[in-house]
Amino acid sequence: MMKTMRWRIDSQRPDQGLIAQAAALLKSGQLVAFPTETVYGLGADAYNPEAVKKVFEVKGRPPQSPLLVHVSNLEQVYGLTAEISPLARLLMDRFWPGPLAFILPASARVPAVVLGGKKSVGLRMPSHPVALALIEQAGPIAAPSANLSGRPSPVSAEHVMDDLDGRIAAILDAGSTGFGLESTILDISREKPELVRQGGLPLEELEAVLGFSLETATASRPRPAFKTGSLKIELCQDLKQLQELIPACEPNNTALVHYGQNPLEGMAYKIKAYTLDLKGQGGGLYAIMREAESQGLKRLIFAPLPENLTGLSRSLADRIKRAAGVG
């Protein structure tokens, strides 16, 4: 097992010496985890097929699941895609750098292993200063989230270490991420854009620029179910279901997740409770899931979700439903 180096780095003024060391590792075919404004990414040189294969091996990721390629400038984009439509350029100018990835026709230069058997490539320009500095020195980086496949995405370097310590060369540790929620993915390789994944860019902002409502892609990218060891994640559909479920739970191994007002307050049931701010940034969701698991809890029960959610709240609700295997 290799020793994973953990380099602490300022999130706003990254040490260029550390960036150069991390870039050198990437150029030599090694894997480096780095922060973005969404979650931590597990990076490999996007033009090195052998390095990219390591990403799949380390994560246990299915080979048919494509990787997003992270860029720092438009010149890199032109080397990775066969075509940038006027709409694509409009959206890039409006939302990049930021938590939005585009699926575009891939150029012949992109290794097949990055594409997962498809003819299109996912591209994103992150806004995190550390990520941009690293990409600027290393070139385009193929990077999914820096966790074992199916595990909650990492919103801190500690989460990366929990999953990947001894499996990768280094981690650039810049503290907690901003959104703590993966990027939104928009497929613009087709005649009409389609939403592949809700994420850090609210759907409403995209649709306001596009001028029409987005449909969800019929063949979304493969997304494995969450793997949380012995922790069972449940989502109650209404308050009645919650009130019927809680009495049957063991207080010592169960926790409730609510959204600001505990629906069990004033009742006789005393179980651990987490508060998740649906209107805030998303890092709390994955942090709660990982903490509950580390505490040895067996059940994590989410209170009923409010109706008519918008913005990041809608994306968070999507992740909660996915974690619970519903919706």
Image (cartoon, rainbow, N blue to C red):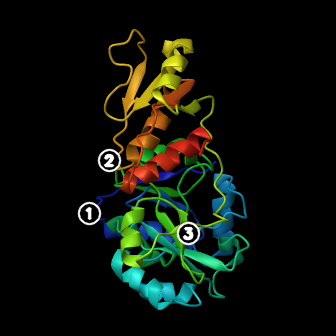
How crowded pointer 2 is (Cα within 10 Å; few <14, some 14-19, many 20+) is rated as some
Residue topped by disc 2: 279
Mark 3 touches mark 2? (CB < 8 Å): no
Q: Amino acid at mark 1?
A: Gln
The disc, 3 or 2, on the residue closer to the chain's N-terminal end is 3
- Where residue 285 sits: x, y (%)? 43, 42
Q: Amino acid at mark 3?
A: Leu
Give the numbered dot on residue 68.
3
Q: Residue at x 37, y 60 (%)?
A: 37
How crowded pointer 1 is (Cα within 10 Å; few <14, some 14-19, many 20+) is rated as few
- Where residue 208 sits: x, y (%)? 36, 72
Q: Is residue 265 above or below residue 315?
A: above
Say which of 297 and 16 sits in front: 297
In the image, taking residue 12 as reference, residue 71 lies left or right, namely right
Q: Secondary structure at mark 3?
A: strand
Mark 1 and mark 3: Cα distance apart in space: 24 Å
